[in-house]
Structures are given as structure tokens and as C-alpha cells.
Image (cartoon, helix red, strand yellow):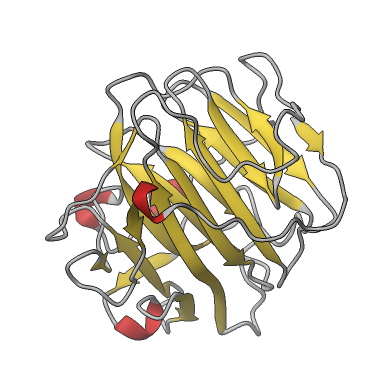
Amino acid sequence: MDEPTSHGPLPAPRDPSPSDIVLTADFASEEQWVAGRSWAYPGGGPVNPGDNKLDYLVSDPDYSRSGVFRARRRPDGKWNTGLLTTEGSAQGFTVRTGDVLEARVRLPEEIGAWPAIWTWRDGDQEIDVFEYHPDNPDLLEFTNHVRGANRYVHDEAVGPGAWVDLRTEFGARSVVWWLNGTRVFADRRGVGHGWHAYLIVNLSVSAGRYHPQPAPETTEMSYEVASLVVRRPPAGGRPRGRTAADGAETASAAGDGAQEPAEP
């Protein structure tokens, strides 16, 4: 379902309380992130054609460790792609019910690029912080696969190459998504009280079923995650970092959804 948002100026960056922060993403850290494999892919990868992906996961640090997630065409028609996950890492970080994730992202420009930040554990527990496809240039996808809710959000600040600020609150009764300081979707489904899942940050490549493949002349694509933090408010506390946009409810009742699959 399409959801317009307000188009006012970006708010000043929020300054989270250090005492709330439980993860500051250091993509170069092998203790925090594993590169080039994920059990969200059959057998841990490297390919996942059943999910309409041309990906061939690689651990080469040039594809992910700088925070710039890259994809490069291979001679066999697949694409070497960058993926990082906390699953299997030494720290084994998981997002939990009540956590708040904030990220600053530069969207890709090339048709066929499929960036996402999402969660995964034991074949399920998937919440999509965001997905993007440049063939729908002003649209971001937000999905709760745990309890079945999603929203497609159009905004003039979204476009190929644009920087966006994302915020996701993993509530027990409602997952809430924010875009550039404005609350754009509260699913009123939530994740339940015992939910926890690993983080995945990656760039996939569309195989053409739902979104077009890259143009034949395209050989490389990228998007950037400049920052990613997860905060865990004190038990019973209100998540910090709210803005004047708080309370601008644009959520629908449970069950609102989109017209096409949005699996990352």
C-alpha cells in the first residue's frame, strides 16, 4: 500500500544517549560481522536463485567492509555481492524486542540493485528495516514478515543516489518505521515479547521476476551505509531520540499490505 509522507526539511541529526547504545556497527570488525555467508541463503550461500537473486556472495572485504556494499558482474551471469551478518560472529549480536535501529544510507542508482537491512534467525524472524529498487525511484519498502504486515512508502526525498535516515522500532505490539525524522508506518502487529534476530546488511541483484535485471552495460553497482546503531532503552523506558514529528501517525490498521513480494 502506498503511503505519502510529509516533505518538510530534514530535522537536525539526533544524538542518541551513549548509555542506550548496544551496537555501533563497525563493518571492518570480524568479531562483529561475518562476510559472504548467511543461513538466509540455502546452505549458507553463495547463491539464492529461488528468491529471484543473481547474487554470488563473496567474503572479499572490498565488497562490504568499508560500509560501501558492492556488486560486480561475473562472466557466468551471476554477480559477486557483499553481505555482512552478525550471525555466526564472535559477538553474535541479536536485535531484541524493544530495540531501536537507526541507519544513514545512500541508495544505489543502478537498475537491478536491491539493497536491504534486515533481520533473520532460524529460517524466520525477518523484519525488513528497508528495501529499495531504483526502478521504483521514490519508493521504500518496509515489511514485518514475522506477523505479516508491510507498507510501500513514496517520498520525494527518496531517489537513486539519495541519502536517507532510517529508524525502526522493534516493538512487541507494533514495529514502527521512520524516514528522515517522520513516522511513516506503524504495523500494529509487532514482533512479540520474546523475539530476537541477527542483523543482515547486503546488496542483492534482482533476477527479473519482480524487478528488472541490470542493464547489459552495467558491470558494477553499490550503496553505502554510513552509520548503523542499535539502542536498547531501559526496561519500561521510552525510546530516546524522538523529534517533533513524534505523534504524526500515518499507520494503518493491521493487514495493510503491498501488491508484490518484498523478500530481501
> Residue 110 location, x and y as percent?
67, 73
Q: Nearer the viewer, residue 72 or 86?
A: 86
Q: Nearer the viewer, residue 16 or 61?
A: 16
> Residue 19 location, x and y as percent?
35, 50
Can residue 206 be seen by looking at this rendering? Answer: no
Image check: 253 left or right of 198?
Answer: right
Image check: 253 left or right of 7?
Answer: left
Q: Residue furthest left?
A: 90
> Residue 130 location, x and y as percent?
56, 48
Res 191 → quadrant: top left
Can residue 190 be seen by looking at this rendering? Answer: yes
Q: Residue drawn 47% across and 17% down? A: 173
The image shows residue 89, relative to residue 248, as above or below, that is below
The image shows residue 263, relative to residue 79, as above or below, that is above
Res 184 → quadrant: top right
Image check: 26 left or right of 184?
Answer: left
Q: Residue drawn 28% across and 64% down? A: 46
Q: Nearer the viewer, residue 239 or 114?
A: 239
Q: Nearer the viewer, residue 168 or 245?
A: 245
Q: Residue drawn 22% across and 36% down? A: 122
Res 208 → quadrant: bottom right
Looking at the image, how many numbered discs can be counted on the residues?
A: 0
> Residue 220 location, x and y as percent?
55, 83
Q: Quadrant of the N terminus?
A: top right
Q: Residue drawn 60% across and 38% down? A: 177
